[in-house]
Image (cartoon, grey):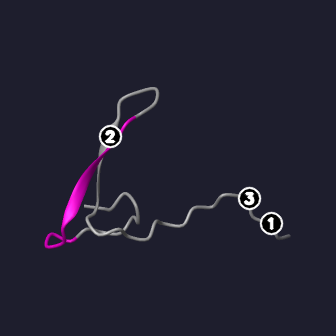
Amino acid sequence: MICARCTKPIKSDEPSEKVEHHGGTGAGATMDVHARRCQPAPQQTSPTRRIR
């Protein structure tokens, strides 16, 4: 399993939780996450500068 928050594997001996994610315009999804709060995966929020 892969954690939906940090995108790292959840080992079989680690506690995990199932979280319902409701879709605004469609069906929702059930995601697996670590039971202990993990660091979210980094996301790019602005474009990077082009290097020529």
- Mark 3: give few (<14), some (14-19) or many (20+) Cα within 10 Å: few
- Residue at x 48%, y 66% (from the top left corner): 41
The answer to which image quadrant residue 34 occupies is bottom left
| Quarter assignment of residue 46 | bottom right
Q: CA distance from mark 1 to mark 2?
A: 35 Å
Q: Position of residue 36 (x, y in %)?
A: 29, 69
Q: Earlier in the sequence, mark 1 or mark 2?
A: 2
- Residue 24 pos. (x, y %): 46, 30
* Residue displayed at 54% across by 67% down: 42
Q: In this figure, which residue is indicated by the disc labeled 3? A: 47
Residue 14 shown in magenta: yes
The CA span between labels 2 and 3 is 29 Å
Circle 2 packing at 10 Å, graded few (<14), some (14-19), many (20+), is few
Q: State the mark number for residue 49.
A: 1
Q: Which mark is residue 3?
A: none
Rounded to the nearest whole Å, what is the CA distance between mark 3 and mark 1? 7 Å
- Residue drawn at x 41%, y 27% as measured from the top left: 26
Task: Give the magenta-colored segment's residue range.
Answer: 11-22
**Residue type indicated by callout 2:** Ala
* Kind of residue at disc 1: Arg
Q: Residue 45: x, y in percent?
A: 66, 58
- Marker disc for residue 29: 2
Q: In the rendered view, does 44 fall on the left or right side of 38?
A: right
